Structures are given as C-alpha cells and as structure tokens.
Amino acid sequence: MSRTGAAGRSPAADLALLVRLGRPKFLLESVLMVTCGVAVTVYLGHPFLIGPWLVAQAFVTTTHLMTQYCNEYFDLEADSAHTGPTAWTGGSQVLAQGLLPASISLAAAFVLLFLSVVQLAVMPTLAARLLCVAIVALAWFYTAPPIRLNYRALGEVTTGGVLILLCPALACLLQIGTLPPLLFAVTTPLFLVMTARMIVMNYCDRDSDRSVGKRTLPNTLGPRRAAWLFTALQATAYVLLVAVTAAGVLPLAVGVALLATAPWAVLLCQRLLGAPPSVDDASGGNRLAGAATVHAAATGYVAPAALVAAAAVRHGFTEAVLGALLPLAIYTVLFVAQWLSEHRAASPQRMTEVSRA
C-alpha cells in the first residue's frame, strides 16, 4: 500500500486537509452555547452535573462537525464559484481547490451523522431525544437536499435557532429536566445577534451564491434591505435585553454586561449601511465577517461568564459555581489557542506582503 496520498502527499498531510475541511474553529461556537445552558442552571441554584454536560457537549460537537462536512460537500458548487473566499466565508476551499475528493467530505458527514443518531438514541428522556432529532434534522438539511434550508432564505434563522436556542436548551434539559424562563431571556437576544451575523456571512458570498441559485437572505432581499434587516435584528436584540432586564427576568449584572457589547453592534450597522464591502473586496469582506463573528462570540461569552459571576455573588463559590467554571475555562483556552495559531499563520503572509510593497 502506498504511504503517500494524492499528488504524493503523506497520510499526515491528507489528515491535515481533512481537519481543515471540517473548519474546527467554528466548533467553538457550540462549545460556548452548551456552556451558556449550564450557566443558566447554576445561576438558578442547581448543581453542576459533569456527566450530563459531557453528554450534551459530545452530541452537539459531533452534530456541529457533521454539519461542517455536509456543508462542504453540498456547497461545493457555490464555494467553487467564489472569486474572493475569506477566512470566514466561501468554505474551506479544500474541495474547491481539488485538494481532496468530494466523496471524502460526504463520507465524513455520514459517519458523524451515524454517531449523532447513536447518541440521540440513548438520551435519557423523550424530550431530550426529540430535541436532538430537531437539531440533527435542521443541521443536516441546512444544505443537504431535498430541503436545503440555506438555499431557500432560511439558513440564517436555522443557524441561529439550532446553535443559540436548541443547543443551550439541550444542555439545560439534561442538567435539570426543564427549560426555565431565564434560559429564553438569555438566548433569545443572542439568537437575533447570531441570525444577523449569518446575514453578514451570506452577504459576503452573495454573488457566488446567486450564480448557482442559492437564495440566501441577502440575495432574496437585495444587499440594501439585507443591511437594514441586519440593523433591525441588532436593535431588537438590545431592546429585548433592556426589557427582560427591567422586568427582572434577566439578572441586572448579566443584562448590563450584555448591553456593554452594543457599541460594537452600532459600528457593524454603520459599516454595513454606510460603507459595505463590494463583492470584489475580499479583504473588506473578511474584516466585516470577522467583526460580526467576534461580536456574536463576545455576546455568547459574556452571557455565561456573567451568569457564573452572578451565581457566585448569589450563592457563594459553591461546588456548582466552581464546576461551571470548567466549560468556561475550556472554551477560553481553546479560543486563545485558536487565536494564537491564526496569528502565527498570518504573520509570514503579512511579512511577505510588506516585503513586496
């Protein structure tokens, strides 16, 4: 048997491409959302149960990774048509550049689909199993036929719904067996922010998507109306935060911490409405998509961090509060490691660009 892959690559190089194909940096989003569900239960005075947390995180991560490989395969035509892919949009470009056969991505997606189904089948309650079925179905049919949600102007809300509403709900359900009002007070504004962020992602892909008949919200509404929808979603999210905080559903410290991210949202709205990047401006698109992604991640991080801090004030540094710091610390370490890796990878490229200037 040959010890090299396609075009003389080593098995290690092929494995690296397979990992790149899965776009692992996006998996941090689901880690954060499971953490958010756990933080809600700890704030309410429940113990932190490490077993149910691991079960929730294993299922969510498996399904999220399945989605990545599924999207790479079924979005290949759109990714291949992209003239200016960025670090955030246009797919991994592994398949589009012919670095791996497309069948590898589909095979990986099916393996992960099988693992997700096995995990949902052994969930402890009927409610948890039904919730997992919804997560898997929406994740798979995000790009897979015959439904192809992201080809029917439903991809943005699907991403927000699964990632921000259903994943924390699963974590909460496995921890305490119910879904308290606080969970929705926290996650509904974040859902609006994530849906807005996905509009930006598809905004940057609009020409290549349109060329293959992919009807995302920016292509359905047009760039200008999509920008206004982005603004409306951000405004609604922060108005809702004020309302649930004033009503006492959301702890004051958590509401104030989340509202502190509002200036970032204002800057994003001004950029998209006033000086949006053109389809030929890959650098501008990369900056805008990156800024929208970091803003969404910031709100997602602030929510559980503030909830755990509020829980410490409310209950003291109990075993549950200290336990809830574990998933938050894991996310923080993974985020910093990813940032350092990307920073090191980008440094030689920036030096090359400067030397050519």
Image (spheres, rainbow, N blue to C red):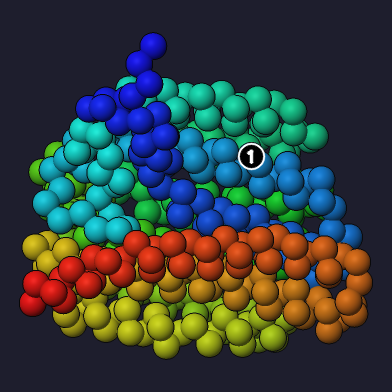
Query: Could you tell me residue 207's position as x and y percent?
Result: 12, 53
**Kind of residue at disc 1:** Phe
Viewed as shown, does residue 87 lie left or right of 234? left
Q: Nearer the viewer, residue 205 or 3?
A: 3
Which quadrant of the structure image shows residue 344? bottom left
Q: Position of residue 289 (x, y in %)?
A: 31, 66
Label 1, residues with CA under 10 Å away: few <14, some 14-19, many ≥20: many
Q: Residue at x 51, y 73 (%)?
A: 298
Rendered position, 285 above or below 246: above
> SS for tag 1?
helix
Nearer-the-camera pick, 153 or 7: 7
Residue 227, image x, y percentages: 25, 70
The residue identified by callout 1 is: 59
| Residue 247 visible | no
Report the quarter where the N terminus lies. Answer: top left
Residue 192 drawn at (x, y percent): 46, 66
Is 119 rendered above or below residue 188? Answer: above
**Closer to the camera, 69 or 140?**
69
Question: In the picture, which quadrant includes the C terminus?
Answer: bottom left
Q: Quadrant of residue 99?
A: top left
Q: Is residue 178 visible?
A: yes
